[in-house]
Image (cartoon, helix red, strand yellow):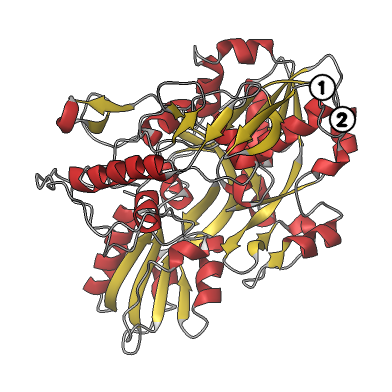
Amino acid sequence: MIFSNSLDYEAITNQLDKENDVITIIGCNTCIRVSGAGGPDKMKALALQLKKDGYNVKDGFMLPIACMEPYLATAKLAHEVNTIVVLACTAGVSNIKRNYPHLKVVETVDNIGLIVADTNKGVLKIAMPYEKHQHKLGEEYPIGSDGKNKMPKEQIPIKVGVN
Amino acid sequence: MIISLRDISYEELKNKLSKDDKILLWSCNTCIKFCGVGGYDKMVLLEKMLTADGYTVIGKELVSIACLYSLTEQHQQDPNKKELFDEATAVISLTCEDGYETAEAVFKDKKVIRVVKTLGVGNFSMDRGPILTAPFEWTELEQNDQGYSFPEVAEKLNLYPTFFDRNEAAPDSTDDLIRITINQKEYQVKKDITIMQACEQNGIKIPHLCHESDLTPDANCRLCLVKVKGEQELAPACATTVKEGMEITTEDEELNHNRRILLELQMASHEHNCLTCHKGNPCIAGSCELQELIREFDIKESRYEQNKEKYPIDNTSPVLSYDPNKCILCGRCVRACSEIACQNNLGFINRGADTLVAAGANKDFDQSISLVHCATGT
């Protein structure tokens, strides 16, 4: 699975224009929900916050998997939409950028790398981080914690980063 | 999705095995399947190749998400599979490196063999298939929203863009072939396979809804009933093994008449608006196989009275919505949940016309993921 952490709210709004952007939010309901940086609840919270702060959020689509093109066809964007806020990992963002080259695409998360998880214990472990997050190799977090509350002791007995 | 490409040749794979090994093929059914290096079909192909070369493959195990440690443990500890896991001495892991590390940690006493190199994340595109968009830095490829195709990546990183080629192994042994006749034409097929498999291998299509190749047969939809010479009853093709000299008829007026009745009964059982619904369109997200058959059999309406009773739609799961009004009770989700997801938390409740699929103690659908196995895309 792919692990992503939310960007600060300001980092998202800095990419938006209150006057001109007509926004749709496209979310992914897979890895990013497990990470805690996305999923239906996060999407609702982000949409409400943006609306409250005066941004023109038109609608939103929660895709089962945002990194696969066929699913993207289920998001029927309104004609006036000119900005997509993507609540998905880098792969989802690329998919949307490639398919909507004429629209502004706003990222909301930072990709950390790949994880293994134990759903019985509710813990995930960073197994293959991208270079800038290499120091996080082997770190464990509660599932859905968005990279917060690092586990003090190893919960998943998998040796990562040795192959 | 996670992007992985094969990094060992078939010869290198064989060098990691010994003829005494009892081999278990272990594959994830998620990203790696879309990368073309895993999934049930690839396990079947690899089993054929290794068996033809004299290796002993004792089983194939498909796991819904191989990077889940708990799920891998559940498969290993499942009482129905315990014998298989105990007997295996080598596990070939058709998973990404995440899944491989998980398998290595769970199957500690076995030789676990990695087949792929994981390169980063990417997309499944309609025109180019899987593409790599966010590679790991060690690949020395830049992040690229347009994505790198597999042949391009394979060439740059000295990997293989596709799965093993069947021609790399010895041809199938002819010792275990038998002769059967299907629709008055003679075929040579492997013994111990089902009529459905024999037909699929020879390009003969038999309508079905409850059958799926990676699940155990259940023969409940009765659409695959065929005629076997000498048998009084019609035989379900998905659950009947071929025998030497068997003469099979898969299609005639009577069989098609039966199938049409079964499909019309399905249409009448609930609110199936097959004539106007878009679900039958082929799509990676899952299409309605019932509607496809309704179209194939040119059924415009059901002659039976439609059951108009409406059940509430269950939206309690964060990832799936279950509409009992569209469910045809084929049981594929139930079997997938048990056999692939190893959860055993889906089942049937009630009896007769009131039968429904339910999760756990019939509370809600909050745990099971059998999305891709639904025959009607409900």
Q: Tell me the quarter of the picture where residue B287 sits.
A: bottom left
Rendered location of residue B270, percent (x, y): 18, 46
Discs 2, 1: same chain: yes
| Residue, disc 1 | B55
| Residue, disc 2 | B14
User: Which of pointers 2 and 1 indicates the residue nearer the eye?
Assistant: 1
Residue B335 shown left or right of residue A115 in the figure: left
Residue type pointed to by label 2: Lys
Q: Tell me the quarter of the picture where residue B373 sits.
A: top left
The reply to whether residue A155 is in sight is no
Mark 1, secondary structure of its residue: loop
Q: Tell me the quarter of the picture where residue A86 sits.
A: bottom left
Rendered location of residue B171, percent (x, y): 85, 34
Q: Are marks 2 and 1 in contact (CB under 8 Å)?
A: yes
Residue B73 shown left or right of residue B32 in the figure: left
Q: Distance between the Cα atoms at labels 2 and 1?
A: 9 Å
Specify the label residue B16 is tagged with.
none
Rendered location of residue B256, percent (x, y): 39, 45
Q: Is residue B72 above or below residue B249?
A: above
Mark 2, secondary structure of its residue: helix
Q: Is residue B196 above or below residue A79?
A: above
Residue type pointed to by label 1: Tyr
Viewer-proximal residue among B187 and B151: B187
Q: Chain of mark 1?
A: B
Residue found at x 49% / y 11%: B79
